[in-house]
Amino acid sequence: MIFSIVIPAYNEEGAVQDTLRRCLKAGEGLVAAGLGLTEVEVLLVNDGSRDRTEALAREVAGVRVLAHEANKGYGAAIKTGFKASKGEWMGFLDADGTCDPEFFKELLAYALREDVDVAIGSRMHAGSRMPPVRVLGNWIFRTIVNVIGGTRVSDVASGMRVLRRSSLERLHPLPDGLNFTPAMSVRAILDPELAIGELPMPYEERVGESKLDAVKDGLRFLRVILETALTYKPFKFFASTAAILAAASAGFLFLRLGGPSAAPVPFYLAHRYIEQWMFFRLILTSVLLATAVFLTALGLVAQSMVGLINREEDRYGPDSGALGKVLDRFGLLGCLSLAFAVLVNYRPLASYMAFGQIPPEFWVFPVVGAIFVLVGFEFLAFSAMARIARLLWEREKYRRPGD
């Protein structure tokens, strides 16, 4: 079995040679550690450095040096190294001297013992020399990821880890920038076919100037975490937003919130009409509720599609569990909603047909009816999408050997 160590480097002339020599020495220890390794290869990818990084790296015998003519990004450099490597297991670490290559022995042994696909070296412990601002940022990112994934991973952005080559297909696509590592972590956490684990690792202060912009790259980290999580847990995202919108609409309907009189619903129940200033709230509520239903239905259909991509038929298949049953009822819910809209508007329509006008006490009904019209068409539209999803599920089932 071959283990490949990939080292991305951009303007790291101060630490590159020491890092490479330590990796070569660690490689000798890995082969002798009884982990079943026959070879450890060390690859450095120079990502368009403007200093002497590449020249210094080529002076270290036993290292394969690859080069990007221009800077493509941290993640792009790692992916170049992965593509050129030949190991069944791969590891990567930064070239800045912060990570100890000897830790690969513990990390790989842990991955093999626990049968995980991605093993992370965690910097989030008392002995770490990580700058405080990064500790705070990593705490925020890990909290978000753990809430989404229901896990307890402590360092989602660590730059030292090992992984199976066979897991790369499920981890892709991965970004080219510094957000490469959090994206990998989120995919490994949320993918039901992958297992992730971590061990505390020694972490020192870097040699040279950091390329990380705490604000700019922090926002990129947050964006890639949310975007990646969205592709695995769309219902959780959309349903959470829908719940907020529904709660806001309930507040506009039932709470006074600074109005000149009671809230619309209590006022209507007491007087059987609504005041003019309340129409704005009713219209806003219509938009909020219709959007909430739209997001909920979108989340359900999207979750079914994600289940198809990840082959989670037992959880998200059209014939499995509550999700399939709900999707099958979208058409009925749409028809019922439209029918209720007509029923609600019967009295104002009858009044208009008979007298050519709608009494003020009836104006609430067209607004309420509009909500059900919008919701009805939304359900009918997503019913069509759910049928497409079912068709794709059936075709996928037919294509699988043995099914």
Image: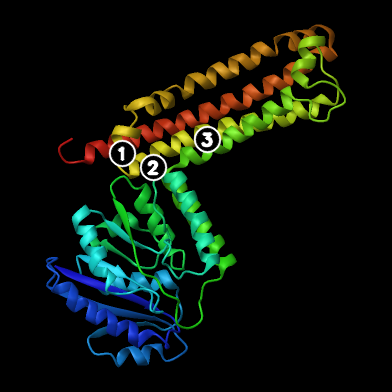
Q: Confirm whether residue 358 shows in the render.
A: no
Whole-percent x and y of residue 262? 82, 20
**Residue found 64% across the figure and 17% down from its top:** 341
Whole-percent x and y of residue 239? 52, 35
What scheme was used to colour the molecule?
rainbow
**Residue found 39% across the figure and 52% down from its top:** 153
Q: For the residue marked with disc 1, what is the amino acid? A: Glu
As drawn, the label of residue 321 is: none
Q: Toward the viewer: 105 or 221?
A: 105
Quarter where residue 287 is shown: top right
Is the Cβ of the residue at disc 1 closer than 8 Å to that at disc 2? yes
- Which residue position holds label 1? 312
Q: Toward the viewer: 251 or 296?
A: 251
Q: Toward the viewer: 91 or 86?
A: 91
| Label 3 vs 1, first from the N-terminus | 3
What secondary structure is found at the residue carrying circle 2?
Answer: helix
